[in-house]
Image (cartoon, rainbow, N blue to C red):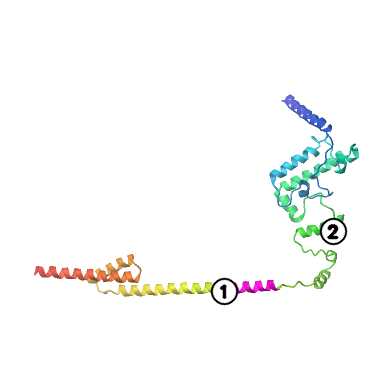
Amino acid sequence: MVGQVCKGLASRTWVFRRFASHASDQEPIFDHAWPKNSNPTPYEVFGIPPGQVDGRSLKKKYHAMAKMYHPDIASGIRVLKSKSSHHDFQIDESAVLSIQDKMHRFRIMSEAYELLGDSRKKSAYDRFRSGWSYAPTAGSGASYATAAATSHGYHNNGNYEYWNAGTWEDIHNLNRDSPEKKISGWVITGWVVGLFVCVQCTALLTRIEDSLTKSNLTHDDTERELNMAYLNYGLDTDKWSRLRRFLWFRTYGLYRDKSDLDREAKKNERIVQDLKTKELQAGGAKH
């Protein structure tokens, strides 16, 4: 077991050495993607705009950059400091990044990759600019503070006095002395037209609601009156009264329109009268 592990480590070391020796024979290269400022943001390190971070593309860019700056596999790769020295016939070693410089870049890209790859760290950085070790210090100028405040939505009028105001009274004086913004006539016209349209729409909806409510009340009143009218067919308990009530309930279960109810009521009454006539004829025949 120990022999296999040693054999694997030896083969891996041989691969690294072979890659490094092969890379040392190559000409120096210049990393065009590396940001030019000394204190880049995590987004600038990988050239990704904020809000467009994709895990797959981030990992792909990290691996591509690791081939130039990783201390194990890129020790033999020479990276130029500036683009101008790339065209020199004889390249001075001072124009090439030292091991410490490459290690510094590798630390920057590793921390940027860890920050952007973690959603919680990325959210904290986007909101509070926290968790990034290579951010500009307080003495690097007011431009970074102004840019950070603007990115977080704070008021910025680009005025030197605004950012150097010492008290709230200074801010109040700045706001008081600043010229007032004039509202154009088109804006006022738009507000008036919008208000008029809202009022008319509200009135129209109210009229429609009143009409529907009145229609429902009228229908309910008519139905109630019809029920009272047709249920008053003979309150007696004789056979023909019970028959009329039976026919009415059956009709009301089938129809709801007034014309249909009137038509069926006449039919029901004819049925009752026919039955009465047949009963009288049957009684007379017996006698």
- Residue 9 vs 245, above or below: the answer is above
Residue 114: name its quadrant.
top right
**Of helix, strand and loop, which mostly describes the magenta segment?**
helix
Earlier along the polypeptide chain: callout 1 or callout 2?
A: 2
| Observer-nearest of 74 and 114 | 74
Label 2 residue SS:
helix
Please state the total of marks drawn on the protein image: 2
Distance in Å between CA atoms under marks 1 and 2? 53 Å
Q: Is residue 32 above or below residue 232?
A: above
In the rendered image, residue 83, in percent from the top left (x then y), is placed at 85, 43
Mark drawn on residue 121: none
Instruction: Tell me the residue at 30%/65% (across/down).
Output: 250
Range of magenta residues: 185-197
Q: Can residue 113 be seen in this view?
A: yes
The quadrant of the image that shows the C terminus is: bottom left
Q: Where is residue 5 in the image (x, y as percent from the top left)?
A: 74, 27
262 left or right, relative to 170: left
Name the residue tied to disc 2: 142
Marks 1,2: beta carbons within 8 A? no
Residue 200 numbered mark, or none: 1
| Residue 239 seen | no
- The percent coordinates of residue 8 (x first, y second) are 74, 27
Q: In this view, does 188 lie to the left or right of 245?
A: right
Q: Which amino acid does label 1 sit on?
A: Gln
Q: Magenta segment: does it hold 194?
A: yes
Q: Is residue 143 magenta?
A: no
